[in-house]
Image (cartoon, helix red, strand yellow):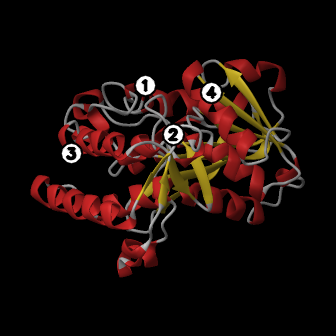
Amino acid sequence: MGRNNTDEEGSVVSGLVLWQWRQNARKSALELGVPTAEVDWLLTEVAGLDSLTLRLESFKERSQIKLPYPLSVLSQLWHRRLHERFPIQYLAGVTSWRHFRVNVSPAVLIPRPETEYLIDLAVQAVKNSPTPNLPSGHWADLGTGSGAIAIGLAEVFPAASIHAVDYSADALAIAQQNAQQLGFTQRIQFYHGSWWEPLYALQGQFSGLVANPPYIPSKLVQQLQPEVRNHEPHLALDGGSDGFDCIRHLIETSPNYLRPGGVWLIEMMAGQADTVTQLLQQQGSYCHIQIVPDLAGIDRFALAYRSEGVEG
């Protein structure tokens, strides 16, 4: 429901009316424990107001502000945010990720800021590798969701072919829409299927895998914030009884697809680093295994390389 849907059925309000709406929305947010900053984020998306204009409240003087829909609809959306704990990003239909605006819907996990670091780690992993031509080969984003990681990889590795896979057809539709809007249609190929399976014909050819797989233990999914538990796709969250089902699968199957020296890089949750390290070591096809913390100091990423001359 972002600003992209505008104009034919759009609506115009005065700055004073929108200012009053903002005052009321911020008050209700405070009362119900929702960050008041979300009001301004929503207005940035739907009314095109920048943060300085909102902070100074200078929009109050404007005679006309264009909205993509009537103010009553905006009120309904905000009511949903407060009382159903519906994520603000789904209400706007977009979120920011790295320097991109990415379309999102309840079919896809909302890309998190910490996941942005995966792209920087992929770049660093390539720089630190003696293996030639890694940036120009095939790269995979398995469980692509909104397509954010695939798009990030396409940007930093302009000579690479990016392959994005998802089990959800609805998620793939969003990812393809994002690739098109951001100009990466020619660079990213999309596949409907499970993990590596649609890429069987490219076994042994991948320079890297970068993924944010489901890693939350099933019993913990119900303990997540209501925004996540009730609205984000469980397919993208639930990592099985111990949280390692998908990670274990990616560790077992990736050596068949990665070329020697290829990069294996995933996100995980706090407390999983030791087990992931152990699983990678036991598999026998990986070397230079590293655990990398996120900006908050939490062990968040696991990086390894496909060993030279080892059959998977």
Q: Which residue is mark 2?
A: 104
Q: Which residue is mark 3?
A: 82
Q: Are marks 2 and 4 in contact (CB under 8 Å)?
A: no
Query: What's the CA distance linking mark 1 and mark 3?
Result: 25 Å
Type of amino acid under label 1: Leu
Callout in the foreground (1, 4): 4
Q: What's the mark number on residue 172?
A: 4
Vertical placement of 205 versus 128: above or below? Answer: above
Label 1 packing within 10 angstroms: few (<14), some (14-19), many (20+): some
Query: What's the CA distance linking mark 2 and mark 1?
Result: 16 Å
Q: Which residue is mark 1?
A: 235
Q: What's the mark number on residue 167?
A: none
Type of amino acid under label 3: Leu
Considering only order in the chain, which callout, 4 or 1, is on the residue closer to the N terminus? 4
**Closest to the observer: 299 or 80?**
80
Q: In this image, 41 relative to 148: left or right?
A: left
At 71% from the left and 61% from the top, the residue drawn is 123
Query: What's the CA distance linking mark 2 and mark 3?
Result: 19 Å
State the SS at label 2: loop
At 35% from the left and 39% from the top, the residue drawn is 73
